[in-house]
Image (spheres, rainbow, N blue to C red):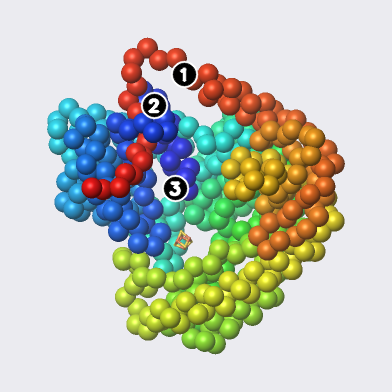
Amino acid sequence: MNAHDSERLAGLLDEAGYQRAGDGETPDVVVFNTCAVRENAADRLYGNLGHLLPQKKNGMQIAVGGCLAQMERTRITERAPWVDVVYGTHNMGSLPALLERARVRHEAQAEFAETLETFPSLLPARRQSVYSAWVAISVGCNNTCTFCIVPSLRGKEKDRRPGDILDEIQTLVADGVLEVTLLGQNVNSYGAEFGDRSAFGKLLRGCGEIEGLERVRFTSPHPRDFTDDVIDAMAETPNVMPSLHMPLQSGSDRILKAMRRAYRRNRYLAILDRVRASIPDAAITTDIIVGFPGETEQDFEDTLDLVRRARFAGAFTFRYSIRRGTPAAAMDAQVPADVVQDRYERLTALVEETTYAENQQLSGATVEVLVAEGEGRKDAATHRMSGRARDNRLVHFTPAETAPRPGDVVTVTVTRGAPHYLLSDAAPLSVRRTRAGDAWAAAAAAQRTGPVTAAPPVLLGMPARHPLG
Ligand code: SF4
């Protein structure tokens, strides 16, 4: 969600006449889009702000927004008085005006609204990818998970109208996009605001009607609200991909209750069974927290047991740590750090073993890969390219004599499954050049030529850090 917000911020600033700073250039404006969910987020923000202080004398403006800004509010300008603008999660659209006002008045500007007035999707966007796009369907969350700060910072769930969402997707597809990921804190409660409990399933089916849209994904679903009509819509809509990221958090019913997650392990496992019965090739991934307050060895064993049964294709694993402002922060029986670490290591080892076994089974399989940019860190050294299979598995492949572009679609044979990816070292079976690949090539050519500007632009970015002293 934050990455998509950054696209909106960049789009807003583009429209206001700002321009991205090039490598090595010192920007005139630096915007921090913060996330309070990350560990030590505040320490890292203040550290970064401190590093920027020496550059302020050159007239640089600094703005801080996002969840952490909503949480810290005016504390930010108290601790870092050189910050020019602080804005809340509901005030993203005000950023250009706040920067302008701070410049004219020579004083810090802060703006926080308690409720959302402009849906961020109405703001312009500078998309990071020409072939794949995020599309927000809702913001905020009506749940109250005790470890989570999101509801108090993002507010109650607000749903976009289905027609607006589908219109946005149509426009993206017309620009070359092949893949969209529908975004919401809880996509399965989508429609609650306008009184349609089956709105999400209908939205998936609506995406299925859009010609040229090849891949539809969504994140995040919630086991409490995940209903059979959504499974049916996934199974019956050909462009909805066979992948599901279903956050588990814990395999212990006692801990799920303490987390205020309104489902239990049996319900979770039953959902996976139903998904696999309807979509046999579905790759299911998850999020798991270890060391939640009060978690006993038995609770943790329950999580390990569920992981063994679930056969996840991947899992994001987290060590619980206190997040100020959440109910769990005040709970007794915080688990000692060494115990959390030990459980974390045992869990990640099991997850790795499971995902390795699942990926090894795909050796010899034929997979269709949407070629991506930046997915394979070692691609230059290995002469491979990378992308995502339909089930969202990362695939590194050897292009051999073919020359696919990011956005093109290749079909390859898997030669080996590794714990975190699939490998194809055989020549691709086919390469399909797509509109998305054409759009990528056109964007790359435009970048080489560079924009034509009449006046020196105001540059945006994050300056390189130089050693102090
Ligand atoms: Fe946070 Fe729970 Fe809402 Fe997810 S569902 S955003 S974890 S409160």
- State left or right for residue 10 relative to residue 465: right
Can you identify the residue that label 3 sits on? 2
Q: Report whether the residue tagged 3 is closer than 8 Å to ligand 1.
A: no
Nearer to me, 209 or 298: 298
Q: Residue at x 57, y 46 (%)?
A: 182
What type is the residue that disc 1 sits on? Pro
Horizontal and vertical percent for residue 330?
Answer: 31, 75
Name the residue furthest front.
Answer: 469
Asked if residue 190 shows in the view, the reply is: yes
**Number of the label disc, if any, that sits on residue 19:** 2
Horizontal and vertical percent for residue 176?
Answer: 64, 29
Nearer to me, 319 or 75: 319
What type is the residue that disc 3 sits on? Asn
- State left or right for residue 133 relative to residue 242: left
Can you identify the residue that label 1 sits on? 451
Give the Cα separation between the discs numbered 1 and 2. Answer: 10 Å
Horizontal and vertical percent for residue 145?
Answer: 44, 67
Callout 3 environment at 10 Å: few (<14), some (14 to 19), or many (20+)? Answer: few
Name the residue furthest left.
Answer: 106
Residue 218, compared with residue 350, is above or below; it is above
**Number of the label disc, if any, that sits on residue 366:** none
Element type at mark 1: loop
- State left or right for residue 299 relative to residue 93: right
Asked if residue 267 shows in the view, the reply is: no
What type is the residue that disc 2 sits on? Gln
Element type at mark 3: helix
